[in-house]
Image (tube, rainbow, N blue to C red):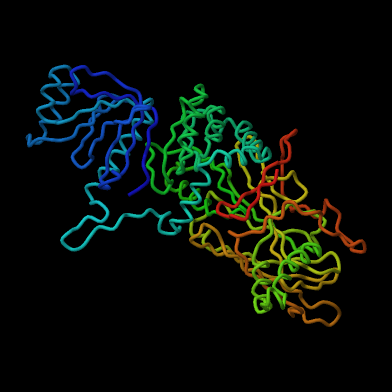
Amino acid sequence: MASADMFPNVSFSDVNAAASQEAAGKAVFGPDPASGAARLSLVRPGAEQAFQIDLSDAQIFKLGPMEWLCVSGETEAKAGVEERMLEAWKAGYCRVDDIEKLFSRAIKVVLRTEAESKAFSLAFQRWKQQTISGKAGESLENGSIVACKSKFDTKIEASSAQMYFHYYGQLLHQQNMLQDFVRTGTYYAAVMENRADFEGKVVVDVGAGSGILSLFAAQAGAKHVYAVEASEMVEHAQRLISGNPSFGQRITIIKGKVEEVELPEKADILISEPMGTLLVNERMLESYVIARDRFLAPDGKMFPTTGRIHMAPFSDEYLYVEMANKSLFWQQHNFFGVDLTPLHGSAFDGYFSQPVVDAFDPRLLISQSTYHTLDFTSMKEEDLYEIDIPLSFVSSVGTRVHGLACWFDVLFNGSTVQRWLTTAPGSPTTHWYQLRCVLAQPLYVMAGQEITGRLHLVAHSAQSYTIYLTMSAKMWGVGADPGGILQTSTAKLELKEPYYRLSQPQAYMPQDQQQLPLSSLQAQGSGQQMQDGLSPGITVDQERDSAAFTRQV
């Protein structure tokens, strides 16, 4: 079954009780822990007991724009009698005693807004339909029913998803992202400078986390915001939103994955922060595209609108030596009487399979950068399963090429202002930093020599990518074959297991190396429009399941 659906602010009362009093609490649709059957739980804050409604024999009837009557335990009354009796009860023409003849329980539920009321009805019908379709593992004549998996569950390992949502369910990690003032400040500026895109509009916040982007949208005048979040962070987000009632009244938090939840209306604009290391790590961009297809109205807007992966070759002798030296441990011939050298080659390859995440000096780049564009408004989800990027550069110096440096930027294409968020080297540091793929076998190039190759990213079920990099130095000089290759080097790297190099000294810069000016090595057309006064980020990007990570502040 799907993840539970929760409505944190409802009022409810048992209309069968002699002294019926409304109580404030929350409504939760989900599976019964013991039987797995779908049920609706109505819980008061601090109370151990709750109303439990088995959805297999339950119905709901609309009493008003925000009021519903949930009934269960039907008798063998004739078809249509229940509806007529309930209509009579609403009009005051029958008593609660009359309803008790038809149902063993009748609970009145009141939602805060019409939007939440519609969402409550959809959730009720969805969970009831799952009950009608059969319970996971239930024995049938021809076998058993297998638990229905969402699209997310079919392509992502359960263990990876559990770790991922656990990570984002913790406030300390949300704080790390909020304290990236480049990130948070750029989102705030993009929203506030484009109020025309939000005022009076329906907004969906995809992967809402703490709810900060939902609050930004409400500040900009959104009519209503649906904050969709699958982790336990929804509990904290609800408290934050409730603590800002002037905006919170227009925000509905929905717990679940965007691949599974239902919304009562189409959105005019999606807002999200789906970017990971190298833009695509964690594969949340796929969920962002799925949310577009499921929730966004025709001609709706997306914040961010497009993303670009930037690449350029680099030379960094200090970094290369540092990585190569890590494997020296395995060159010991007498480690407590044991010869470790048989494992040296594997260790050497293992260290070079880790992409390096750090902030580097842009003067280490030896060529103009190129970029690959991802248009979130038109691309297909499947376009993110494999990303194949051809490479072509011209070296500005004679040097050793140690690999490919990468970073990204995203565009908020607002109606009033176009604003970029960039992670480029030389720009204010973000918690994403930059990423470098280091070649175990560097290339030797001369000034003016062409470097070609391919960056191939292949998604896998651990919510990340395997990186296949090929870089070649083409033949150069008088009489050289125009298509000939002088030297080629390849690498296979795991994006999910990077080397966080965040406390190392500045990279060694050879004194005789003629480097390009800083300005000429910035990303072509990065178009960054940073808000004045924003401070550099002071947090670091923590890999969601990397036990080796140490936070640096």
Q: Position of residue 75 (x, y in %)?
A: 9, 35
Residue 130 visible in the displayed image: no
Q: Position of residue 206 (x, y in %)?
A: 49, 42
| Residue pictured at 27% horizontal, 54% vertical | 136
Question: In this view, which residue lies farthest toward the front?
Answer: 336
In the displayed structure image, the side of residue 372 where residue 104 appears, left or right: left
Image height of 61 relative to 407, above or below: above
Q: Quadrant of residue 483?
A: bottom right
- In depth, the one of 261 and 139 nearer the eye is 139
Residue 293 visible in the displayed image: yes
Q: Position of residue 85 (x, y in %)?
A: 13, 26
- In depth, the one of 212 and 295 nearer the eye is 212
In the displayed structure image, the side of residue 456 where residue 526 appears, left or right: right
In the displayed structure image, the side of residue 502 where residue 16 appears, left or right: left
Image height of 56 relative to 351, above or below: above
Give the tally of numbered discs: 0
In the displayed structure image, the side of residue 413 where residue 48 appears, left or right: left
| Residue pictured at 32% horizontal, 22% vertical | 23
Q: Quadrant of the C terminus?
A: top right
